[in-house]
């Protein structure tokens, strides 16, 4: 979902819903716009090591990370939410742009680097540089998905990998199903390793750019994959001095009802802030979320009324 963040003193307000991006089951959301903060509300923030900010696929500066292929990675401390529980499904979504050859490299990894070390998962490239995923199950059995599309074209590509418990493992490239394998395993894939982005257990560092990493604890459908593929992130930090006016173009709504004006005011304020949703009847299935500077969700609601008047004292913020 498009996110526009307005920096208001010690607060950050995130309006969720300018585009309809799936949020159900979202456990990790790293826009990588200037940092590695998780905006899912689960506070699974990453630690950046030697990766540098770069331009994203839309030409926005400092809105993705470049990994040098030598020692760059983002590490997220192990958390039970990042382990696949018995009967649970996972979906991974991210954007990549290769820089040169990437043979046998890791992009998202909760893997020690050697087969047979226990339940684990990793996503990356195979020995030809095509998409690759590896899931090892309890008991030592495993499944590999190897793609066939050459991604060495210096272009951004959207990758979605879905582990559907007891059913299948599928990989989509640029909104097209590339490879699918059936599985019967429905047990847990759980370990104590940190989640790494841009690297794996044997220092198999990825060289290129990575952006918009999302993990869901469910299977997303093909319509949702299309929504992610068409996502146009516009997270911006704006100093607001009075009324902030957002002229939104709504996806999934036919003209002329696909535009709306949202207002946020006043700033500065001491006690409350108002979000005026304009013609809110046009924003069916849209929502508003407020995230503070610690990446914690302090307010969330579907857009079901003309205005939200939010008491800042309830979450200890002023300004």
Image (spheres, rainbow, N blue to C red):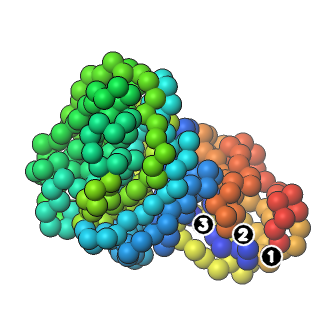
Q: Is residue 96 left or right of residue 218?
A: left
The quadrant the C terminus occupies is bottom right
Residue identified by numbered label 2? 11
Residue situated in front as seen by the camera: 201 or 2:
201
In what element is the residue under mark 1?
Answer: loop
Quadrant hosting residue 122? top left
Q: Residue at x 12, y 50 (%)?
A: 127
Q: Residues within 10 Å of mark 2 (few under 14, many from 20)?
A: some
In what element is the residue under mark 2?
Answer: strand
Q: Is residue 2 visible?
A: no
Q: Residues within 10 Å of mark 3 (few under 14, many from 20)?
A: some
Q: Earlier in the sequence, mark 1 or mark 2?
A: 2
**Label annotation for residue 319:** 1
Q: Earlier in the sequence, mark 3 or mark 2?
A: 3
Task: Where is residue 39? Give x, y as percent.
Answer: 57, 57
Residue situated in front as seen by the camera: 199 or 191:
191
**Label annotation for residue 5:** 3
Asked whether the beta carbons under mark 1 and mark 2 sit within 8 Å of each other, the answer is: yes
Q: Residue at x 46, y 53 (%)?
A: 194
Q: Residues within 10 Å of mark 1 (few under 14, many from 20)?
A: some
């Amino acid at each position: 979902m498009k996110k526009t963040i307005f920096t208001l003193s010690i607060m950050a307000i995130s309006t969720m819903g300018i585009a309809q991006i799936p949020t159900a089951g979202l456990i990790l959301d790293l826009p990588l716009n200037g940092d590695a903060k998780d905006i899912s509300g689960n506070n699974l923030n990453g630690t950046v090591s030697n990766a540098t900010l770069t331009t994203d696929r839309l030409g926005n500066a400092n809105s993705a990370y470049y990994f040098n292929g030598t020692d760059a990675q983002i590490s997220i401390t192990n958390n039970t939410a990042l382990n696949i529980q018995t009967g649970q499904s996972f979906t991974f979504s991210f954007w990549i742009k290769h820089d040169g050859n990437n043979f046998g490299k890791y992009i998202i990894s909760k893997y020690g680097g050697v087969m047979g070390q226990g339940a684990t998962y990793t996503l990356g490239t195979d020995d030809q540089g095509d998409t690759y995923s590896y899931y090892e199950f309890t008991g030592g059995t495993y499944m590999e998905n190897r793609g066939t599309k050459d991604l060495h074209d210096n272009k951004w590509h959207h990758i979605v990998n879905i582990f559907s418990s007891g059913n299948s493992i599928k990989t989509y490239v640029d909104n097209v199903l590339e490879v699918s394998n059936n599985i019967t395993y429905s047990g847990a894939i759980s370990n104590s390793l940190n989640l790494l982005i841009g690297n794996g257990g044997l220092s198999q560092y990825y060289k290129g750019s990575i952006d918009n990493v999302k993990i869901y604890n469910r299977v997303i459908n093909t319509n949702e994959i299309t929504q992610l593929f068409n996502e146009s992130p516009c997270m911006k930090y704006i100093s607001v001095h009075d009324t902030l006016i957002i002229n939104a173009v709504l996806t999934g709504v036919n003209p002329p009802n696909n535009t709306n004006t949202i207002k946020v005011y006043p700033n500065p304020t001491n006690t409350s802030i108002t979000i005026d949703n304009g013609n809110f009847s046009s924003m069916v299935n849209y929502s508003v979320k407020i995230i503070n500077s610690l990446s914690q969700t302090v307010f969330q609601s579907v857009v079901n009324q003309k205005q939200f008047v939010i008491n800042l004292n309830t979450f200890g913020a002023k300004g």
